[in-house]
Image (tube, rainbow, N blue to C red):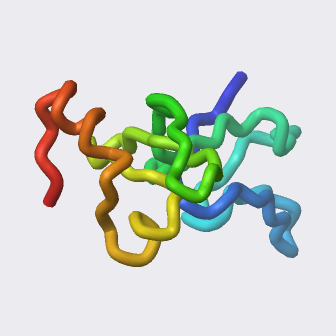
Amino acid sequence: MKIQYTNVLPPHIFRSSDNKDYLVPGWKELPEGTTIEDINWTNPYTSKNTILGTTIGSSGDTYIITKHSNGKITCSCPGNTYKGKCKHTLPYINNTKITRQ
């Protein structure tokens, strides 16, 4: 039997002094014999990012263009990393009709 657990923190099983097992954080009492393998952990903030492609910068370095789960398109180049925008993402933004914020 799988127990669903959604939290940003990974699950842990705590055994109390009266030999009851609890899922923490949250202090949910568990059925006897439950192991950590019986816990189906989902992190609600795990992003589903998609790599759209790569591009070659003016220095010859290869950069990765990524579309994030919130719709934002970013590049791994120094310009995007430090300024939040770069010329490498423009073709992807224009093709997908996504506006930057």
69 over 101 or under it: above or below? above
Locate the N terminus and report the quarter of the image it occupies.
top right
Residue at the (55%, 43%) spot, across then down: 56
Of 31 and 95, the residue lying toward us: 95
Residue at the (12%, 46%) spot, across then down: 99
Residue 34 picture location, percent across and down: 82, 40
Residue 23 picture location, percent across and down: 68, 56
Q: Quadrant of residue 8?
A: bottom right
- All told, the count of numbered labels is 0
Of 42 and 76, the residue lying toward us: 76
Locate the C terminus and report the quarter of the image it occupies.
bottom left
Residue 45 picture location, percent across and down: 45, 53
Of 48 and 5, the residue lying toward us: 48
Residue at the (33%, 45%) spot, across then down: 89
16 over 59 or under it: above or below? below
Q: Is residue 57 left or right of residue 32?
A: left
Residue at the (25%, 43%) spot, across then down: 90
Residue 59 picture location, percent across and down: 59, 58
Of 100 and 28, the residue lying toward us: 100
